[in-house]
Image (cartoon, rainbow, N blue to C red):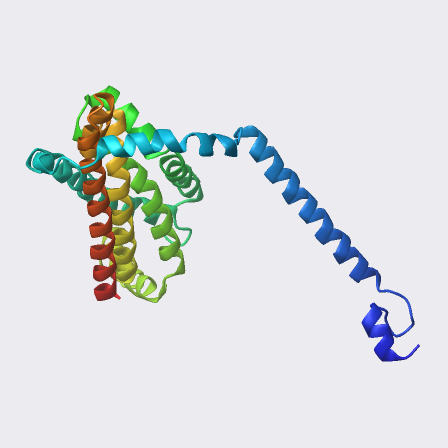
Amino acid sequence: MNSETSAVIGLDASGTKPVMTRFRFLLRIGILVLLALLLAQAIYVVQARPQDIITGVSGMKDLISRAMPPDFADVPNELWPALETIDIAIFGTFFAVILALPLAVLAAHNTTPAKPVYYIVRMLIAVFRSVPDLVWALLFVTAVGLGPFAGALAITINSMGMLGRLLAEVIEDMDMGPMDALASTGAGRLQVFSHAVVPSVLPSLMGITLYQLDANIRSSVVLGFVGAGGIGFQLLTAMNLFQYPDVALLIIMMFAIVIGAERMSAALRKRVA
C-alpha cells in the first residue's frame, strides 16, 4: 500500500490506524452526545412547548391592537419617572466607583496589605456581584420603602461587585514601577494610592465606568417592577390597570432611553480611548 492510499484511509506509515485519531473521534462523539443530553434535559425542565407559541399568536395580536396607538398625550406625565430611571443609574454608578476603588486595591494580590484581607474582600465582592440587582432592590424596598432610593442602593451594591472585580484585575496587571519608586522614598499607603495606583488605572477606570453606566441604565428600567421607582414602576401600574396605550408609550420611552444611553456611552468611550 503506497503512502497516498494510507493517508486517504487514515493509516500511518506502518499500515495501522493511529490510536490517537481513533481516541479523538470517540471523544468528539462523546462530547456531541453529552451536549445533546444537556439540551434535551433543558428542553424538558423548561417545559418547552412550541405549539403554545402558535396558538398564542392571536392573543398577542389582540394585546398589540389594544395598545395602538400609544397615548403620546401622556408624555409630560412620564418624563419625571424617565428622569428617575436615568438618575438611579447615575447615582448607583457614581457611588459604586467611589466604593469599589478601595475594595479593588484590597482585592488585588499586588496591593493588598495581607492575604486574609485579600480573601475576605474577594469574597465580599463575589457576594455583591452574584446577587442580582432585583434581589438587592427587594431587600432595600423592605429597608427604606418604595421609591427610587431603593433602586439606587441596589444598583450601587451590585455595581460595586462588578467594578471591584474588574478594577482588581486592572490593578494586578499594572506596572509596579511607580508604586515601588514612591514606596522607596518613604511615601505612605495613601500617597502611593493617590499618586501611583489611581493614575495608572484611570484610563481603564473611565472605560469600565462607562460600560457599567450603560448596563445600569438598562437595569434601572426594570427595577420598578419590584417597587424601586422609575419608569418600570409606571409600566407595572399601567399593565395592572390594563391601560395598554400607556404601556405602549412607556415601552417606546424605555427603548429610547436604552438606545440613547448606548450611543452616548459609545461616543464617550471613543473619546476616552
- Which quadrant is the N terminus positioned in? bottom right
Residue 99, can we see it?
no
Q: In the figure, residue 184 lies in which quadrant?
A: bottom left
The residue that appears at 84% across and 69% down in the rendered structure is 9
Is residue 264 visible to us here? yes
Residue 103, placed above or below residue 12: above
| Front one among 161 and 80 | 80
Task: Answer with the quarter of the image where residue 191 lies.
Answer: bottom left
User: Quadrant location of the C terminus?
Assistant: bottom left
Percent x, y for residue 80? 9, 36
**Residue 164: x percent and y percent?**
34, 46
Front-most of 183 and 34? Answer: 34
Q: Quadrant of residue 35?
A: top right
Q: Tell how many labels.
A: 0
Which residue: 37% across, 31% down? 58
Q: Position of residue 87 (x, y in %)?
A: 15, 40
* Residue 226 position (above or below residue 97): above
In this rendering, position of residue 224 left or right of residue 21: left
Rendered location of residue 32, percent (x, y):
67, 48
